[in-house]
């Protein structure tokens, strides 16, 4: 087994060695590639924490490569062969589709926590095909697909390693081969969880039930989950269970966005000083923009990040008005945010089905038009591996100075959505976009209020989270103005990128 060829910083090397020690205790030796069968023993939980740019994602990627090189089976939540259950396994998870997609873009096969907690139940005929596609069975003779379609599915699987997408390339829909979803009954083996600062206690407990060897990757400078008054899950872990990376090197040399994020750690830094710093950076580097207005063209795919809820509603109203959106319907291309599922207990299976398809609280979607049934919407789930889905929807459009939202259309029950042209910084955690617009007047208000959270001024925590959502460009918007759109909303690029993927139609509720 060869060690990583890249050069680690001292703290990265120490963290890698500590994780290697943890895995060695579990029977997986990264130094010589020796893998022993799993055995019952004491559960291991560790956390690798560090601020943006400290190299957490780099370490996660290198550990994944080393484990895969040692012969560890990667579990995607997509399809699991019964014939491979005796093998050691690794699952790489994130709380949201968007966070998982960030890892997948870096070559790490991540999936969502929901897709691991709940597994698909395949029709036996198609399970034989899935076994063959994943390399654990012979090519089947089946009436379900012709020889030509089998070959087409095989070629598709080699390209993206997704069984549903491969079967979709043969002309099938999810309802043809997935008969339902069930809570995972048997534990897995090794679990890596990215963006662990977003986990609540219930999710943490669920993950510990499934993974005897669990490694969390998180940023201690982010905001704690709204429903976690005790802070982040790794805050309560013992010191010997935590490893912290310090920023002793620069990722993406001279990154001005990371420079700004780390400047917030200065206890003497005031809001006015920070804004002057942003303005100076904008004069030196075009990756930072001192914005005099919100760029409306960006809002359809990258929401404006705000602190106050009334700011969010005003920006959404302005976005719809400038695009001429009628009160009674949505335009194709409007962004939405899933706000949860409104389903009674008797529809538990349907809830699992929708969640497994990516419609979980906080998911960012783009509206593609009405579905074939009243109250249904065709949606593109941003960051999902199979992004296009048609589902029963309840869409709520909030308006300034009105307590009750306007509902342009709704099914009796299903996935609920709020508009997504602007979102709170809290809800943006776990997501990243190429370009991010931060509405600075909101952070000025937070600074004037003098609120403190976890021993740090709230405005600094908000600014840190908002800034680190930007991958390529940060626009620091300083005025309450909105530009005019350069053209209408479009969805052609989404339809083209998802052409070989799966269009899933949810069933109507009884």
Image (cartoon, grey):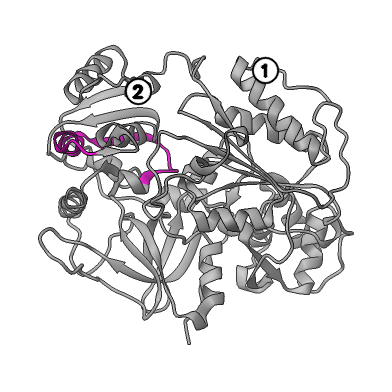
Where residue 338 appears, as percent x and y from the top left, is 39, 60
- Position of 123 compared to 247: left or right? right
Q: Earlier in the sequence, mark 1 or mark 2?
A: 1
Marks 1 and 2, how far apart at CA: 29 Å
Q: Which residues are magenta?
A: 428-451
Within the magenta stretch, is there residue 436? yes
Question: In this picture, is 49 found above or below 502?
Answer: above
The answer to whether residue 129 is left or right of residue 93 is right
Q: Identify residue for label 2.
A: 265
Packing grade of label 1 (10 A; few <14, some 14-19, many >=20) is few
Task: Name the front one of labels 1 and 2.
Answer: 2
What crowding class fits label 2: few (fewer than 14 Cα within 10 Å), some (14-19), or many (20 or more)? Answer: some
* Quarter placement of the N terminus: top right
As drawn, is 368 to the left or to the right of 108? left
Q: Choose top left, top right, bottom left or bottom right for residue 222.
A: top left
The image quadrant of residue 455 is top left
In the rendered image, residue 450, in percent from the top left (x then y), is placed at 18, 35
Q: Is residue 221 above or below residue 100?
A: above
Tell me: 191 left or right of 55.
right
Q: Residue sitting at 71 percent across and 25 percent down?
A: 17
Residue 198 — which label? none
- Secondary structure state at the residue bearing disc 2: loop
Helix, strand or loop for disc 1: loop
Question: Can you give x and y, in whole percent of width and height, for residue 41 in the image?
Answer: 79, 50
Looking at the picture, tell me which residue is in the foreground, 22 or 412.
Answer: 22
Q: Is residue 243 magenta?
A: no
Residue 6: mark in rendering: 1
Q: Is residue 157 visible?
A: yes
Query: Residue at image x 40%, y 22%?
Result: 258
């Amino acid at each position: 087994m060869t060690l990583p060829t890249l050069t680690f910083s001292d703290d990265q090397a120490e963290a890698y060695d500590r994780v290697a020690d943890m895995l060695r205790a579990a029977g997986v030796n990264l130094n010589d590639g020796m893998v022993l069968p799993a055995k019952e023993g004491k559960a291991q939980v560790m956390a690798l924490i560090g601020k943006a740019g400290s190299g957490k994602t780099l370490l996660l990627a290198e550990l994944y490569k080393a484990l895969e090189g040692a012969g560890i089976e990667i579990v995607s939540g997509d399809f699991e062969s019964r014939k491979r259950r005796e093998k050691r396994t690794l699952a790489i998870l994130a709380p949201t589709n968007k966070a998982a997609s960030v890892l997948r873009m870096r070559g790490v096969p991540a999936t969502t926590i929901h897709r691991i907690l709940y597994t698909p139940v395949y029709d036996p005929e198609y399970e034989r095909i899935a076994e063959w596609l994943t390399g654990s069975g012979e090519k089947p003779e089946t009436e379900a697909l012709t020889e030509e379609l089998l070959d087409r599915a095989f070629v598709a699987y080699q390209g993206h390693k997704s069984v549903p997408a491969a079967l979709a390339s043969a002309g099938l829909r999810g309802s043809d081969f997935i008969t339902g979803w069930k809570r995972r009954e048997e534990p897995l083996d090794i679990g890596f969880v990215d963006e662990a600062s977003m986990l609540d206690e219930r999710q943490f407990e669920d993950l510990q039930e499934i993974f005897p060897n669990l490694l969390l990757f998180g940023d201690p400078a982010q905001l704690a989950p709204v429903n976690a008054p005790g802070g982040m899950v790794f805050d309560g872990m013992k010191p010997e269970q935590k490893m912290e990376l310090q920023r002793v090197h620069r990722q993406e040399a001279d990154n001005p966005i990371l420079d700004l994020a780390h400047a917030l750690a200065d206890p003497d830094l005031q809001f006015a000083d920070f804004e002057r710093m942003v303005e100076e950076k904008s004069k030196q580097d075009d990756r930072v923009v001192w914005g005099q207005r919100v760029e409306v063209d960006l809002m359809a795919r990258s929401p404006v990040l705000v602190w106050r809820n009334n700011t969010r509603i005003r920006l959404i109203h302005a976005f719809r008005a400038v695009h001429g959106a009628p009160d009674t319907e949505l335009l194709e291309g409007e962004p939405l945010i899933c706000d949860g599922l409104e389903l009674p207990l008797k529809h538990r299976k349907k809830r699992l089905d929708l969640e497994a398809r990516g419609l979980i609280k906080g998911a960012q979607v783009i509206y593609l038009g009405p579905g074939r049934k009243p109250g249904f919407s065709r949606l593109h789930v941003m960051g999902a591996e199979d992004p296009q889905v048609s589902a029963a929807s309840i869409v709520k459009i909030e308006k300034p100075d009105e307590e009750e939202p306007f509902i342009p259309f709704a099914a009796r029950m299903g996935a609920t959505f709020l508009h997504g042209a602007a979102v709170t910084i809290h809800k943006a955690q776990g997501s990243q976009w190429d370009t991010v617009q931060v509405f600075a007047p909101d952070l000025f208000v937070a600074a004037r209020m003098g609120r403190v959270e976890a021993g740090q001024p709230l405005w600094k925590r908000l600014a840190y989270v908002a800034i680190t959502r930007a991958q390529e460009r940060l626009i620091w918007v300083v005025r309450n103005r909105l530009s005019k759109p350069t053209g209408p909303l479009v969805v052609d690029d989404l339809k083209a990128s998802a052409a070989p993927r799966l269009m899933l139609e949810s069933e109507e509720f009884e």
